[in-house]
Each structure stands twice: as structure tokens, then as C-alpha cells.
Amino acid sequence: MNIELSTNWIALKTIVYREVRRFTRIWPQTLLPPAITMVLYFVIFGNLIGRQIQNIGGFTYMQYIVPGLIMMSVITNAYGNVVSSFFGSKFQRSFEELMVSPVSPHTILIGYTLGGVLRGLMVGVIVSLLSLFFTDMQVHHLGITILVVFLTATIFSLCGFVNAVYARNFDDISIIPTFVLTPLTYLGGVFYSIDLLPPFWQTVSLANPVLHMVNAFRYGILGVSDIKISVAVAFMLAATAVLYIVCVRLLVSGKGMRQ
């Protein structure tokens, strides 16, 4: 038992180190572009357009969209890191060696997931620091803020893993981000409050999982939200558990692991 635990612990540290080393080594491609993109959002939406928009929830438009933009960067980078890394391992057939090793599927999954979470959090910190050049930002509920951003990064890291498992070529790893993730993010309350929508579309918007994450994070930062925080956190915990079970089952079955 001690040997097994030692083996899995070494494997976990190795996978996490490799994942972190992977995106920090090419930081001009992984960390710099999202930072530049978010600065453009701050300038164009928050500063130029924001001057023409009235306060929302007692905050300036710039203050209101900052939590959403931070969450957007966390979501896209956590997802993108896992889907590209795991599919790359499949494409190069290096993952087959890991599958036949005595490493637990849980260890493999946690390693890849932590890599995505760490990249998402790192980009989130960078965007948060950049936002300070444009507006004042004070954390209203530190515990909720940390919990929500960690759960969100975990959920989309696991989603990226599922996408990578079923992907057959490099085009497949861009379909979900382009046609699913991007629309959900832009319609997830990043740039507006759903209170501005007609009642019917407010109800429809509640089906968007990103809306719950963005509003829960906004509550942690600003103390305002369009939805109940308890519902949002419960949803994220449930989503994390379900996605983790699904990913472990995919690893155990070996489905889609060989090209």
C-alpha cells in the first residue's frame, strides 16, 4: 500500500509539474494573449462604452464587468489547457505508456485537472492585477471568491478533459470552445445584469451554467448578484462531482484513448 501511494504521489507531482512547465515555458502564447485581450475589453467596453452606461447595482459599468471578465479568462484558460495538453498526449501516443503504468486513473485525472486549474488561476490573477489600473476593486467575501473561482476552474478543466477524450483531430478540440463555450460565456452575464432582460429571457438565462458562476464570483467581489449564491455553489459542487465521475469512467474504460 505504501509503495502504491508513493508511486501515485510521484506520478501526480510529475504530471502537475509537466503541465505547469508546459504553459509557463511558452508564456507568450499562454499567459500574454489573454492579458492583452482583457486589457482591450477594459478599454473598449469598460472605459469607452461604459461612460455612456448608467451604474448597475450601485457600481460603475467598469466595476460591474471586471468580475465577469476575470471569470471569462479563468474559464477559457482552464478549459484550453487541459483539452490541448491531453489531446496532444493522445496524438503523440505518449499517453498509452501512462495507461499501462501502475498509476491510478484518479491520479492521472487530478494531475491534468490541477494543471488546468493552475493556469486558469494564474491568468485570473494577472487579469485581476491589470484591472487595478482601470478601477478600484475590493473583495466583499474572500471565502466565496476563492471557492467559486476554484470550482469554476475545476469544472472547465474537467470539461476540457472530456472534449479531449472524444476529439479525433485538432479541429474537434476547437468546436466546443467556438460554438458552445463562447456563446455561453458572452450570454452569461459578463457584460450585463439579467435584470435588464424581459422576464421570459431572464428565465431562459437561468439555464446557462456560466451565469451562475459569473454571478457567484461577482457576489464575492462586489456583494451583488442576480441569483441565489447557495443555488450557484450547490450547482457547481454537483457539476464537479458528476464531471469527475464521468472522467474517471472514461479513463478506466480507455474510451477514445487510442488514435
Image (cartoon, grey):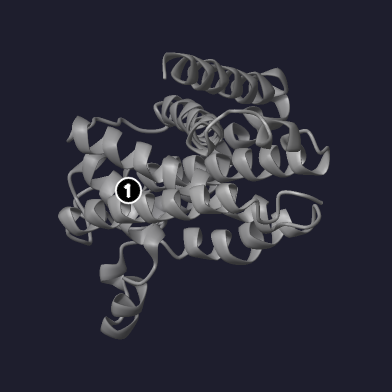
The x and y percentages for residue 194 are: 30, 68
Residues 113 and 176: in front is 113
Q: Residues within 10 Å of mark 1 (few under 14, many from 20)?
A: many
Outermost residue on the bottom side: it is 200
168 w.r.t. 203: above or below: above
The x and y percentages for residue 84 are: 69, 42
The x and y percentages for residue 152 are: 39, 45
Query: Can the viewer see residue 189 in this picture?
Result: no
* Quadrant holding the N terminus: top left
The number of discs equals 1
Residues 25 and 32: in front is 25
Query: Can the viewer see residue 112 in this picture?
Result: yes
> Residue at (30%, 81%) from the top-left corner?
198
Question: In terms of image quadrants, where is residue 196?
Answer: bottom left
The x and y percentages for residue 241 are: 35, 50
Given the image, on which type of amino acid does mark 1 rest?
A: Tyr
199 w.r.t. 150: above or below: below
Residues 213 and 20: in front is 20
39 w.r.t. 240: above or below: above
SS for dot 1: helix
107 w.r.t. 68: above or below: above
> Residue at (40%, 58%) from the top-left corner?
210
Q: Which residue is mark 1?
A: 64
Q: Is residue 128 left or right of residue 28?
A: left
> Residue at (43%, 52%) from the top-left corner?
245
> Residue at (35%, 42%) from the top-left corner?
151
Q: Is residue 70 left or right of residue 44?
A: left
